Amino acid sequence: MASLKGLASALESYRGRDRLIRTLGYCCQLVGGVLVEQCPAKSDVGMRLLVLSAQLSHCRTVLRLFDDLAMFAYTKQYGLGTKEEDCFVRCVSILGNLADQLFYPCEHVAWAADAKILHVDAARWWALSTAFWGLSLLLGIARSLWVILKLSRRLRSPTVAFPRQPPCSKWRTLEAQIWSETLTLLSNLADLANAVHWLPPGVLWAGCFPPWLVGLLGTVSSILSVYQAVRARDNQADHQ
């Protein structure tokens, strides 16, 4: 019953609903791709799952038409990151916010071009939006690697200001931060692999992934995102 209430509560929020739609979409693509390639007798079911996956992806694209203002508010609140103690983290975070902010209008134009609302080259705008997404992921990966490196050095440092016993709360806090950044790193790496796949042909492995591999990478990224969201919610509940 508690799990059902938690799911219902998550679905009441936009982010929670988006995570569910994303996870379902990639799972459908994974299963559908496997059925189409490995099970000819069930290829019709596989094709239907791939169509469902495409529709769920389109649903998320339409919902993102309203994300610009929220992203702008977050970017404005972060500003130049004066509250960040680390200069490198501040720089990559600012650049990441800028890439995210530019991603949305480019995707909106691409969507409008596909819908015949605007008479522009949709492929060019899709490529541009994907490039900004990939840039944001690269910056996120660099940030996570840097933070993990710094936190690991603190754990190994002989001059740490707290004892090295597992019961120590500061020790557990550092380990939890490293674990969280590691999950974010893995999620971003999986998404980056897909982002490159969706770039124009000729760019690294663009266009080379079969549907099931795209679905697998997306499913891994989505599950990690859901896990982190549930973990954050539980930690927040524990501190209330």
Image (cartoon, rainbow, N blue to C red):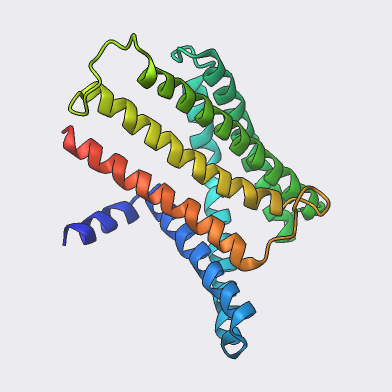
Q: Is residue 223 visible?
A: yes
Q: Residue at x 62, y 42 (%)?
A: 104
From this viewpoint, which residue is outermost toward the bottom? 41
For this rendering, which residue is in front, 4 or 205?
Answer: 205
Q: Residue 105 occupies which quadrant of the picture?
A: top right
For this rendering, which residue is in front, 166 or 202?
Answer: 166
Name the spot of residue 137 as percent of width and height, x first: 59, 38
Q: Residue at x 34, y 8 (%)?
A: 159
Q: Is residue 14 visible?
A: no
Look at the picture and state if 41 lies above or below 75.
Answer: below
Q: Residue at x 64, y 49 (%)?
A: 193
Look at the picture and state if 173 lies above or below 159.
Answer: below
Name the spot of residue 127 as percent of width and height, x first: 75, 48
From this viewpoint, which residue is outermost toward the front? 158
Q: Residue at x 44, y 34 (%)?
A: 181
Name the spot of residue 6 as percent of width and height, x first: 24, 54
